[in-house]
Image (cartoon, coloured by chain):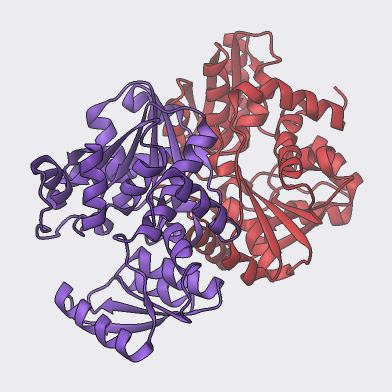
Chain colours: A red, B purple
Amino acid sequence: MGLGIAAVEAAAERIRPWVHRTPVLTSASLDEVVGTTLYFKCENLQKTGAFKARGAVNAVAQSDADVVVTHSSGNHGAALAYAAQTLGKRAIVVVPEDASPIKVANITRYGAQIVRSGPTLESREAVLGEVLAGSGGDVVPPYDDACVVLGQGTAALEFMRDVGHLDSLWLPVGGGGLAAGAVVAVGDAVRVVGAEPALAGDAAAGLAAGVRQPQMPPHTVADGLRTSLGALNFEVLHGYGLHVELVDEDEIIEAQQLMMSCLKVLVEPSSAVAFAALRKARPSGDVGMIVTGGNVAV
Amino acid sequence: MGLGIAAVEAAAERIRPWVHRTPVLTSASLDEVVGTTLYFKCENLQKTGAFKARGAVNAVAQSDADVVVTHSSGNHGAALAYAAQTLGKRAIVVVPEDASPIKVANITRYGAQIVRSGPTLESREAVLGEVLAGSGGDVVPPYDDACVVLGQGTAALEFMRDVGHLDSLWLPVGGGGLAAGAVVAVGDAVRVVGAEPALAGDAAAGLAAGVRQPQMPPHTVADGLRTSLGALNFEVLHGYGLHVELVDEDEIIEAQQLMMSCLKVLVEPSSAVAFAALRKARPSGDVGMIVTGGNVAV
């Protein structure tokens, strides 16, 4: 499938009945913090509490299999479970034994079957292979997949249509599905900028060097951003010349507190990474950011 | 000023530049909890984090004085401070010495002057009298005032216009400004229902008896609902025959957790009172509720 604006528009049409058109919030207090006009696209208010529902629904809607399978310790697992339940299929999610209970609960609430693996990527992939052999299902990868990327791109497309104009669009970068989707959807009209925890800065390093980097030890509080940039997404983002800002852990925590107290919405640390970058970089003009998820304990 | 739909429409027009048109959220998970289709009007995402900004802006915009004055330990104080700052006036807020630091900080962030009083209503009113005598300002009461009621009514008006149809509209009742405003704005088109903590059930008791009741000892966790129904609001709500559901403290806390975890927005205990009532009453049809505020510590 070609990665182009028409494909993003087709994805938006395809997923519309099953995802929220999330609101765009503004805050005079946060404008003052950054010194410009900010728009927040609230994908934390999306189905399953994260933008991941978009990519998962777009992928599952195009699968002929009755069973869809993935490995995930986080929001993609819940998104796939939701997509399968909504579209009348069965989902199996391989979950590492050290996954957080709140994320696991968010997967099981949508009726997915959980299969446990060890914590390493090798163990996760080995167990996924067994599940696939046993179920005959389709794999829906968390980010490195054209259907998933196009689905995530619908968030940026909606954002631009609802706001009308943006000078820059900021978003956190983990596996790169959201960033690649945004570049495909709106990268010609607006400058897309990435943000990443310094403790998981593989995208910044790899895009600067022109060579995809393996992930560093994933110690960041931003658990959604511990993955490495996917190969497909690396190609898209390197071709675009994506700039990625790095932020420290205390900047992430501070940004999360500020966003929650001013916007009055739940914000995952991974979402706060983009706002932490905005506080440091202080860009001018009309600035958008995607609030990617809200799955924190309350 | 007459309390009618035209006056609410005029108020909506008057305050539009200074308040958010807040989003309406839905949640399949919460629909399942109550067993019907729910719509949540998110006034917790309003300026100052509560619907109170509507009434305060409507009142201050119509005041000729350079100084506006009130007593408040909560969201009305911040709303008046915001309205004054926005409209180029000075605000003085009498705050009881036992007010929560987070609410006081929310008043001072909008530049209001704080004057401390004792914790009793008598002390608050005595200090307010002194402030008034010294400043020559206009009083903007927290709820028992036509301008304030009409401003609060704009929330229900917007809600009905954005959703198109509701069978019932649920909201918490404290001083009754929001409820009276809703009855005036949309009470002919939709059944307005109130909700109140059993520990602060003066509205339910007073409306059933036909005689306004003094407040009981205000021990409820829902600090926004500890006030008694205002005299003007009692007239409006008694004339309408408002039904008020009572809920227990543990039901309020549970409802607050459920709303936050499913809607991904911050919810004050006072806001959760209406959802707690919905869980018990299980109304059918298209059901709206107003999420009144989100000022909780994060």
B26 and B234: which is toward the camera: B234
User: Could you tell me if residue B293 is visible in this image?
Assistant: no
Q: Could you say which quadrant of the image residue B19 lies in? A: bottom right
Tell me which residue sits at (15%, 76%) in the image. Answer: B122
Which residue corresponds to the image point at 57% horizontal and 29% vertical from the top-left? A79
- In the image, taking residue B87 as reference, residue B177 lies left or right, namely left
Identify the residue at the far front of this view.
B2
The residue at 60%/65% (across/down) is: A28
Place of residue B240 in the rendered image (x, y in percent of width and height, measured from the top left): 25, 38
The picture places residue B26, in percent across and down from the top left corner, at: 48, 33
Asked whether A189 or A276 is in front, the reply is A189
Name of the residue lying farthest toward the bottom: B134
Q: Is residue A295 above or below residue B278?
A: below
Q: Nearer the viewer, residue A24 or B20?
A: B20
Q: Position of residue B53 (x, y in %)?
A: 45, 61
Quarter assignment of residue A175 = top right
- Considering the image in quadrants, where does the N terminus of chain A appear? top right
